[in-house]
Image (tube, rainbow, N blue to C red):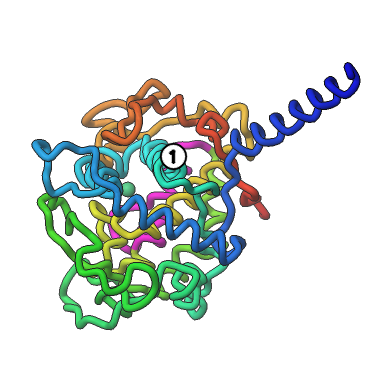
């Protein structure tokens, strides 16, 4: 009797331990390695967050309709304080992790946030055929071509679309996007648009660009390599994904409203994975290596100082405020990556 009971106890402990271990660490995987069922389950959870009522109160902004909009809204509001600054990567790490937790806790999604390793979809000739654009098992593809204006400084080189996404899970929804373009935060129903630039993606997202980024000696240079400059020519991996998908007319190309395209979260998960890959090359020192301006593009510290581990981050109503130090180690956020990039040269 005693033996049977202790056996049962041991069995229960074993079971408990297995399920605790699988809950505790979410393992993020590349989109194309998910099964069709897992992909559909992820998309279902995205649609669920898009349909859930916002936490942002109406008296603050009645244009913020959904839980998805809560995130989009805070990104639009903070645009000029979270890009071209030292906490750019830390803020977006926390933002994606918050989204991942929302999918799981509010929409019953059991998997981890997926990342998009765009290096697998370069060179340019392969770009439009990426599995993330698949109509059946992805996020839908390019919009029909919309004539641009060559004299427009925001005309993304190589853009090939611009209209509403014609296929996939978000097609045919005229009010899929509620806020934007740019810094517009009043209710403005729009379709999801894409304006793929295979040229741009091929130039700024290829393996060589990833290697140059990983080879940077300290966080300050690493961060600048990821973000690049504000011009198209000075783009880094960050701009490569945004303009390679969003071009001139798509939401992904909109510095403010880019999270309106669900692909945003797969792109930023991969940028986060690049950062984690870089951190892992010298983990002990890079878990605490942070620098870069507090103020937009203030790389010479003319306007203010550098970001430190104590610098505060907020993602609005969706999660508690934290500091940069709280998000330096992805283990503290409860996820890991199945694979990281390695430095080959
Ligand atoms: Cu952003």
Residue 59 is situated, as x and y percent measured from the top left of the image, at 8, 36
Closer-to-camera residue (97/159)? 97
* In-image side of 277 versus 8 (left or right): left
Foreground residue among 165 and 116: 165
Residue appearing at x 49%, y 48% in the figure: 109
Residue at image mark 1: 105
Is residue 293 found left or right of 60 in the rendered image? Answer: right
Crowd class of label 1 (few under 14; some 14 to 19; many from 20; radius 10 Å): few
Q: Main secondary structure of the magenta part?
A: helix
What's the magenta region?
A: 218-242
Image point 51% across, 43% down: which residue? Answer: 275
Q: Which quadrant is home to the C terminus? A: bottom right
Can you say which quadrant of the picture contains the N terminus? top right
Q: Position of residue 122 (x, y in %)?
A: 52, 71
Q: Residue at x 50, y 58 (%)?
A: 41
Measured as percent of width and height from the top left, residue 224 is found at 40, 45
Q: How many marks?
A: 1
Identify which residue, 152 or 129, lies in the foreground.
129
- In the rendered image, the vertical position of residue 146 relative to residue 52, given as above or below: below
Placement of 28 over or under 316, stated as above or below: below
Q: Is residue 22 left or right of residue 306?
A: right
Residue at 64% in and 32% down = 20
Q: Is mark 1 within 8 Å of ligand 1?
A: no
- Judged from this view, the residue extending furthest toward the front is 1
Q: Is residue 200 one of those drawn in magenta?
A: no
Position of 187 compared to 68: left or right? left
Q: Can you name the residue that lies furthest to the top here?
A: 2
Inspect this view and state whether residue 248 appears.
no
């Amino acid at each position: 009797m005693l033996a049977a009971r202790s056996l049962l106890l041991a069995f229960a402990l074993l079971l408990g331990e297995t399920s605790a271990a699988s809950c505790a660490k979410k393992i993020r995987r590349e989109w194309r390695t998910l099964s069709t069922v897992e992909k559909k389950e992820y998309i279902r959870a995205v649609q669920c967050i898009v349909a859930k009522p916002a936490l942002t109160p109406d008296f603050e902004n009645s244009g913020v309709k959904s839980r998805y909009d809560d995130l989009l809204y805070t990104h639009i509001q903070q645009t000029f304080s979270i890009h071209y600054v030292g906490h750019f990567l830390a803020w977006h790490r926390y933002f994606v992790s918050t989204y991942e937790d929302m999918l799981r806790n509010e929409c019953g999604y059991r998997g981890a946030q997926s990342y998009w390793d765009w290096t697998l979809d370069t060179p340019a000739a392969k770009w439009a055929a990426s599995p993330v654009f698949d109509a059946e098992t992805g996020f839908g593809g390019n919009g029909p071509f919309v004539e641009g204006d060559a004299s427009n400084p925001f005309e993304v080189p190589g853009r090939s679309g611009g209209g509403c996404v014609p296929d996939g899970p978000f097609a045919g929804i005229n009010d899929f996007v509620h806020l934007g373009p740019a810094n517009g935060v009043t209710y403005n129903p729009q379709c999801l648009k894409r304006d793929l630039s295979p040229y741009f993606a091929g130039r700024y997202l290829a393996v060589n660009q990833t290697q140059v980024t990983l080879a940077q000696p300290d966080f300050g240079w690493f961060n600048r390599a990821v973000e690049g400059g504000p011009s198209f020519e000075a783009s880094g991996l960050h701009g490569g994904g945004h303009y390679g998908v969003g071009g001139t007319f798509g939401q992904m190309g909109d510095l403010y409203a880019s999270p309106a395209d669900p692909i945003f979260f797969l792109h930023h998960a991969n940028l986060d994975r690049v950062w984690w890959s870089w951190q892992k090359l010298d983990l002990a020192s890079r878990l605490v290596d942070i620098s870069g301006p507090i103020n937009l593009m203030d790389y010479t510290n003319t306007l203010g100082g550098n970001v430190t581990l104590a610098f505060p981050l907020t993602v609005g109503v969706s999660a508690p405020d934290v500091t940069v130090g709280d998000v330096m180690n992805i283990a503290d956020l409860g996820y890991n990556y199945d694979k990281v990039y390695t430095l080959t040269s």
